[in-house]
Amino acid sequence: MAVMEKLGINKKSMQKNWYKFSKNPLSIIGLVVVLSILLITILANLIAPYPEHAGWFTDFKNAKLPPSLSHPFGTDTLGRDVLSRVMFGFRYSLMMAIVVLTLVVPTGTSLGLIAGYYNNTWLDTIIMRLTDVFVAIPSLVLAMMISALLEPSLFNAMLAVTLLWWPWYTRLVYGITCSLRNEYFIQSAEMIGASPFHILVREILPNTLAPIFTKMTLDVAWVILIGSSLSFIGLGAQPPTPDLGTMVSDGYKYMPELWWISIFPGLAIVFTILGFNLLGDGIRDMFAAEVH
Amino acid sequence: MSDPILSVKNLKKYFTTDLGVVRAVDDISFNIATGETFGLVGESGSGKSTTAFTVMGVYAPTAGKILFNGREVSLTRVTKRSKDIKKEMQMVFQDPGSSLNPRQTIKQILELPLKVHNVAKGKRIEKMIELLERVELPESYLERYPPEIGGGEKQMVAICRAMATDPSLIALDEPTSALDVSMQGKIINTLIKLQKEFNYSYLFITHDLSLMRNVATRVGIMYLGKLNEVAPATEFFHKPYHPYTKMLLSSIPVISEEEEKMKPEKVVSRGEIPSPVNVPSGCVFHTRCNECWDLCKEREPVMVEVEPEHFVRCHLFE
Amino acid sequence: MTEVLLDIQNLYVNYQIFEGTLKVLNGVNLELGKGEKIGLIGETGCGKTTTMKSILRILPQPPALIQGGKVFFDGEDILKANPKRLNQLRRLDISMIFQDPTASLNPVFKVGVQLGDVIKYNSLEAGESLSKEEIKHKSVEILKEVALPDPERLLDNYPIQLSGGMRQRICIAMALVSANKLLIADEPSTNLDVTIGDQVLRLIGNLVEEKGTSVILISHALGAVKGLVDRVAVMYAGNIIEDAKKEDLFSDPLHPYTRGLINSVPKLTGGGIPEGISGRLPDYINPPTGCRFSPRCPHVMPICRENMPQFKDTGERHKVACYLYGDEINE
């Protein structure tokens, strides 16, 4: 709690934020979708009807079955229950998002703070030009390049996405830092003699949290999309990992007869992205300045 | 003046912009005595705020010297000044909304100066409560956030923060301009009371001449980076010499008849304030001056003492 | 007595926000005659801008809500007017100058375009259609009227290239085009330097003299309005609490708030800084019952806390809403 206070979050502001958030029903829908996905992810072991199908498993007698009561999403060419695999698939998608963001947000933010505070110096130039290089290349192309250079695996896909993602946070935080840098309360802190560390972390950072948080939520959707795209072209998770993108790719050649093998994982991706987008929009509205 | 607390000599601050060089502060000199309130007035573009910021170190001077208690502090920006100097010079800003970090509690805001200047951790709360008492704010304010309190109260907190390091000189840049007139009295009177109690010296900046009349001991008026007249307050208002001073004084909106009578004869202000990038030649005021003659367009006047302690920069009096 | 142009009767306006309902306007009463100039004094948050926006019907509804009252403009109830009629009024008869000239002008359009648009819509409404040449000619004329140098070249400038005083004068020019009957000026000189602000106010004064336009000049600075207006109305927390000819108001202020306000202004003749008025503006979500100034009033009486005093004429068209001057006391 003390940490939260140090960063400027308190009870009354949370209540007010909930009020603003809940005004839009779409945001609530987004929240519900995201929470359901999180629940499924955590409880996959318990609620999946055939948890063992998520790994090495074959049952050719029950392969290629269309959706039925015992297999609501049907089975794939190796006889594995698609529903269970989709549930476990959420894990990999979310895991990628969490890992990537955990690495990218602190690094990108720190670089942005430093570049912004020391703007118009060599430090600023180095950091921001480096950022420009990465930003100039389309994200999917860059991800493909990096993944193709390394051995295809989930880990390397995460590495690729991490390397291309940090500049966006640097830019976001850089912009805010530059504009806050000349505010009176920063001048005052300098006059008092506060260290640069204090100014960056205690004065500027708390004012950047709202946009960072909004962006993070929307980024989960993006990372999942890119990760799934990489898996779709074979550069991400390898079989038998039930990654959603890989599943779409596996069933792709059997379309349209065995449609359920690709469609259901595809829909899972769509719902995940939709959910996080709606949630992210709701969060952005929540932090939007009140008009008066 | 015996050993002034602040001595500014030939201070210049120029900014290079895309449109040219802005001579925000162009060769001004003045002193502030211990315990006095030195006022700087002027319109926008006059350079009064820039002067305060340069003295306080937000900007490094382009040229000239700033001496605090005889020690030179002008070399670089405030971040490079020594801690004991930083302790002595503090500032209260114009906009209370952006001078306090909206994401910090008052307690955190006041704790920073205490922490930096080594007040023992156990004694900090005590000191913060004492500071709030000085401006008649209750202890409960420590837990509140700036957006929750009113503009006048925010300025009070800003004043507490300025006092927290026990400074000798406080610069106040239009401290009440953003507030309503009914709040102004309380804040200014508090400042005056504190000045007597703690022997602060004030560099007070405002464009409100009626306010200045009642606050400052000596007043200087600036125009486009130049200091045109410096005099003790009563002299300045009752016997202004410089044409610009007269123009400004005659434009002040006043209510009562006696104030109307006091104002110098109406000098109709003509024309716009020139752009600071394109400063007029010779005396910078000549484009708007009713008493301008040829010399004014060619040569800059120098500061002369027309009466004891009353200085004017104008060819009429050289 | 001159004909009445604007008659605001008992206007109530609320704002809906997270914490509750702000009962901002609490029964505003204001009368303005044709050709009359009135100053509206009040501090930040007293509701003066809300009142003016209600006249022009530019309040964002929601979160604002007009709860009650009537606003008559030239005999017509404009709270009931349809959008088309409102547009007509805005193009021909009523216009407003705002406090911040920088925010009032669109930074991405040249001055000539913005001024031209105002002229175009005004003339369309009046039934004429002007050609580009005519609009340009008229723009130049108007800029000359507001004493702007080199008008032809100015039309080609962007607002950002001009100083604050010049921008404000352009806003005045734009407002004057479409203000045949009423001009509302919201703190036109506050953001400007004293000398320039002085010029701007004198300009407004001269121009309305010529056209016979009524003016409402809003300010929180008492001295600023003195030169320009005939009457002064004082507003506090959603009510007009005093309304009188300017000489009467300044020489003999009746309401304790007006007195406090006049006394708060530091005098050029010296005498120290007055204490001001103790206390703060009331909380609009839970405003005090009765007179909203009662918590701060040095002359408060029990009756003040029960009901809002009526806004009555004490003779010589000097109106005040205060129990100190009511008949209720004598009962």
Image (spheres, rainbow, N blue to C red):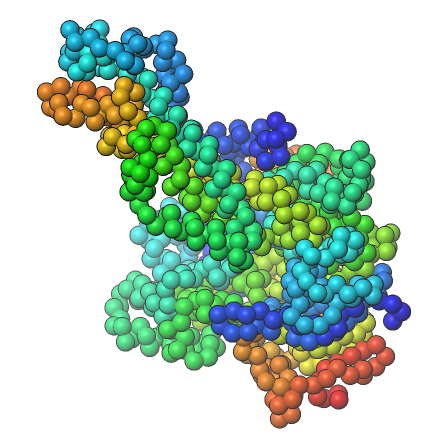
Residue B136 can be seen in this image: no
| Residue at the image position 42 percent from the left and 57 percent from the top | C74
Q: Quadrant of the N terminus of chain A?
A: top right
Total marks drawn?
0
Give percent across and percent down for residue C329: 72, 41
Q: Is residue A181 left or right of residue B197?
A: left
Rendered location of residue C163, percent (x, y): 51, 70
Give me the residue at 47% from left, 67% from top: C167
Residue at 59% across / 36% down in the picture?
A: A8
Residue B294 x/y as whole percent: 62, 93
The image quadrant of residue B232 is: bottom right
A16 relative to A171, above or below:
above
Q: Is residue C324 left or right of residue B274?
A: right
Q: Quadrant of residue C134?
A: bottom left
Name above or below for residue C62 compared with residue B271. Answer: above
Figure quadrant of residue A200: top right
In this rendered view, identify the residue nearer to me: A147 or B222: A147
